[in-house]
Amino acid sequence: MTEHNQRRYSDISGRAILYALLGIMALYYLLPLALMIVTSFRSMDEIRMGQLIDWPTQLSLDAWRIAWDQAQIGARSEKGLRPYFINSLLMTLPAVAISTMIGAINGYVLSFWRFKGSNLFFGLLLFGCFIPFQAILLPHATVLGKMGISGSIVGLVFTHVIYGVAFTTLFFRNYYVTIPGELVKAAQLDGAGFWRIFFRIMLPLSTPILTVCVIWQFTQVWNDFLFGVTFSDPSSQPITVGLNNLVNSSTGERRYNVDMAGAIIAALPTLLVYVIAGKYFVRGLTAGSVKG
Amino acid sequence: MSQTLTSSSQAVRTPAPARSPADRIAQWIPKLVLSPTLVIVVVFFYGFIFWTGLLSFTNSRMLPSYGLVGWDNYVRLFNNERWLVALGNLGIYAFLFIVICLVLGLLLAILLDQKIRAEGALRTIYLYPMALSFIVTGTVWKWMLNPQVGLEQFVQSLGWESFQFDWLVNPDFSIYTVVIAAVWQSSGFVMALFLAGLRGVDDSIIKAAQIDGASRFTIYTRIIIPSLRPVFFSAFIMLAHIAIKSFDLALALTGGGPGISSDLPAIFMYQLSFTRNQMGIGAASAMIMLLTVIAILVPYLYSELRVKKHD
């Protein structure tokens, strides 16, 4: 065997090991999701009779139906996860829209209309990305009460906007500083004002960062549990709280198929967003943390 | 709004210093627009932190009250066995979580960076858990790690009768199950960070090293990995931050149990403040959590700002 051939042989086996490793890791990440999906389509009889981890002998939608609108969760009269799912939608959509809008305008001001102290302001705001929310939970509960919106979806939207603005501003500011300031100056010379430059020039240029920001906020707000469990009452609880109640507080036999169907229902919107717009999701995650 | 639009455009068009009332309003627009956020920052960020700090020095129980009691709550906090368990758990959990995520993330990133055919698909698979809620992750792993019905029972049924994996219900090991689930959820994110970093490494240096006859291993350990230092740094900050805030995952997975064996500061804070009517102690524990975050964050922000000044 010539040296050249030997080299190629070791290269090929190296590649094989590489792909095997990557494949095993892929299995590790996929296994829980696969088990969730498979189990949600099995009937409780089947689970009782045999293995918990097994293929379904026939597709049963019972677990999905029960999780969606038949399971008794806590003491509430409306059954299933459906009301929680609706609450989450009602909470997430306005919270995402409002916090993204505020972030865009803030980023625009902090990039093109700087004033004395605007950098300090940005620095102070940035810290908001890192506050452990436990440090604001108690006063926020008091203030929501004083405002008369505690335990309501409006209160939750308000909360998510307040504590989302730091991130949304960061996204837009870091995006806008890469746009040359001459663009704004030229528009000013042409007589365009603050709002016209924003709506006619900046916003049309912002599609990528808008996508990143909306996806980030959607995932954050939809997946939140701490605010949901602290600032809601039974009529306004989001899906994460509903799922936790379904899994942890129901009495009697554990219905694993229902738990798994419920978990998929809670995860579906963010998973869909991830599958459709994964590229932007990753960009949001890595925004500001990797330089260069 | 149309009025402000015309007035502001006039303000810019006239080169002379702004004099008329309309011009002065135009100059104020940017600051006016920022003012709601200023209120958020001053009141809802720093004001509330200060308020929580104040509560930690009061005798608040179920509702806030303002009888000052000095450092009492902190003394009681650090004499509370449960808090000490929670802090110890946070130490174990944060250390393992951060180290495993960094190692696994770097490894996956390097493997993926070898011109892999299905890179996009694999990346998607490694990262998707990050899109899930911690409650969902907790629900799934709680079931898989349950010895009676999950993996232990499954492996036993395959014929390995003596197989044991009861960490979820074993007080000595329950905190490690939180690590397992948290690593599953977050390691893909670290992989994405490192992969972005790897793609940013200067190719010419690597080519030069190859010409000098350096092996692939040497190139990685001597050139590429050291150049990823900033990525290590920011990944560390993100992971530490996730670890300190960890609340929902442990709550859904173990509920802090069995007993208090997998309790974490965030769970402790929530329960004392909202279900045990010990708001003063809850506020004190929140302040300790905040101080921990600040201790990690200040060096980071300092270096970030220094870099910006250099630009």
Image (cartoon, rainbow, N blue to C red):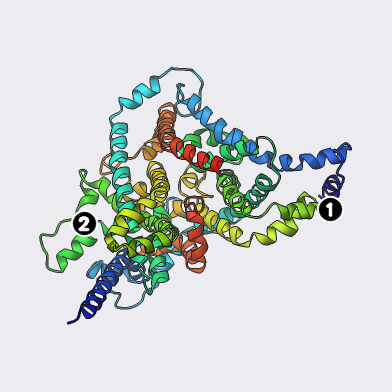
- The verdict on a common chain for dots 2 and 1 is no
The type of residue carrying mark 1 is Gly
Q: Mark 2, chain letter? A: B
Residue bearing the label numbered 2: B147
Q: Quadrant of residue A142?
A: top right
Residue at image coords 34%, 65%: B211
The residue at the far front in this view is B212
The residue at the far right in this view is B20
- In-image side of B186 versus A223 (left or right): left
Residue nearest the viewer, comparing A78 with B88 = B88
- Does dot 1 land on a helix, a strand or a loop? loop
Q: CA–CA distance between discs 2 and 1?
A: 71 Å
Residue A233's x, y, as percent? 51, 45
Image: B268 above or below B200: above
- In-image side of B287 versus A108 (left or right): left
Give the label, 2 or 1, closer to the camera.
1
Residue at image coords 42%, 70%: B120
Q: Mark 1, chain letter? A: A
Residue B217 visible to the viewer:
yes
Residue B212's x, y, as percent? 31, 62
Residue bearing the label numbered 1: A191
The type of residue carrying mark 2 is Pro
- Does dot 2 land on a helix, a strand or a loop? loop
Image: A34 above or below A93: below
Residue nearest the viewer, comparing B183 with B17 = B17
Q: Quadrant of residue B276?
A: top left
